[in-house]
Image (cartoon, rainbow, N blue to C red):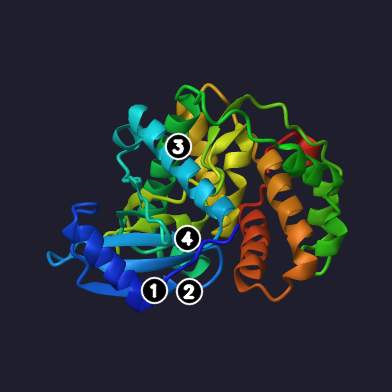
Amino acid sequence: MPIQRPDIKTAKNILADAYKSGQIPFNAKIVEPYCDGGSSFALRCIDTDGTEYAVRFPNTEPILNKILQESEMLQFLNTQHISEQSGLAIPETHYTPHDTYPFIWHQAIVGQTILPHNYHELNETQKSNLAKKIAVFMHAMHTCKLPNTSGKSTTDFVIAQMKVHDLDTLGKKIPAPILQKYKALNLNTNYPERLCHFDLHGRNMALNPKTKDLIGIFDFGDTSVRPCFLDFYKLSFIHRDLTRRVIEEYNKISDIKIDIRDVDLAYLSAIAYRYPHSQNDGILNKSLENFVQDITSTNTLNLSQGHKI
């Protein structure tokens, strides 16, 4: 069922009325779109004291329900003290009902996203600190109790995608020796199921623009119970170097030991699934380039001797 969505002028009036009636705590003096279109109308709002907020007006009932489920998940994570354990900010979302224009808001985590070119700009210490913080966050997620409300999110599609992985579609992007060794690997998905963020790509993390420290993680819309190795592969959309570092740090603090070969196969399978329709995707192509570069530069592809990739 569609939900009417306001234009920018109407949205400003709604937010002004919501502030006057005490429904929201911020007086949005600056209101501008993050993006206009897609599943929701996302607005960047700045209070009179300079605090930034994010507001989303969903345009369908299913999208509204998904955002409300995310809000419920974030409330659960708050009871598990994930932010305190990881030292990272995570958003606290709030729902404001409206007969025609319901919306969800939260105080924004303001920082720099992590794209492949940003990662290349980090020095060795910054890369190491980033990996440690992500690993601690993942460990906090994977060791919290499982929520009663979310149930288990099906992994059938993800696992089936990996088992079918037609990596030959990547033949022009990955050198044949590397591709053949991955094709010969036996897929291991026998990892314990844990609560996973499951969308840890660079646009869902925020760095301090000056220090390059990781300060927050957001977008918990896909958070669900899954085999825990699946929480790592989207890091390779930033760089496999980051994936490798995070796994090394995670394995130091976790009883669960992640094999990067399984994570690599999840990444390559996801790419192989998307690639025929996304051959001009800049981040996808850059991540593949980085993937090959990391394996080549670290000389870690030696499966015949049982070494991890």
| Lateral position of residue 23 relative to residue 150, left or right | left
Mark-to-mark CA distance, 3 and 2: 26 Å
Mark-to-mark CA distance, 3 and 1: 26 Å
Q: Mark 1: which secondary structure?
A: strand
Instruction: Count residues near mark 3 (Cα–Cα under 10 Å), then give few for <14, some for 14-19, many for 20+.
Output: many
Q: Mark 3: which secondary structure?
A: helix
- In the rendered structure, which amino acid carries the disc numbered 2? Asp
Decide if residue 210 is in sight here.
Answer: no
Q: Which residue is mark 4?
A: 203
Q: Return the disc, 3 or 1, that comes first in the chain's sequence.
A: 1
Instruction: Count residues near mark 1 (Cα–Cα under 10 Å), then give few for <14, some for 14-19, many for 20+.
Output: some
Q: Which residue is mark 2?
A: 36
Closer to us: 271 or 72: 72
Confirm or deny contact between disc 1 and disc 2 (CB under 8 A): yes
Q: Return the disc, 3 or 2, that comes first in the chain's sequence.
A: 2
Mark-to-mark CA distance, 3 and 4: 20 Å
Residue 309, position in %: x, y? 68, 44
- In the rendered structure, which amino acid carries the disc numbered 1? Pro
Residue 147, position in %: x, y? 49, 26
Residue 170, position in %: x, y? 80, 63
The quarter of the picture where residue 306 lies is top right
What residue lies at 37% left-to-right and 35% top-to-bottom?
A: 75
Q: Which residue is mark 3?
A: 73
Closer to us: 53 or 83: 53
Q: Which residue is mark 1?
A: 33
- In the rendered structure, which amino acid carries the disc numbered 3? Met
Mark-to-mark CA distance, 2 and 4: 18 Å
Q: Mark 2: which secondary structure?
A: loop
Closer to us: 177 or 280: 280
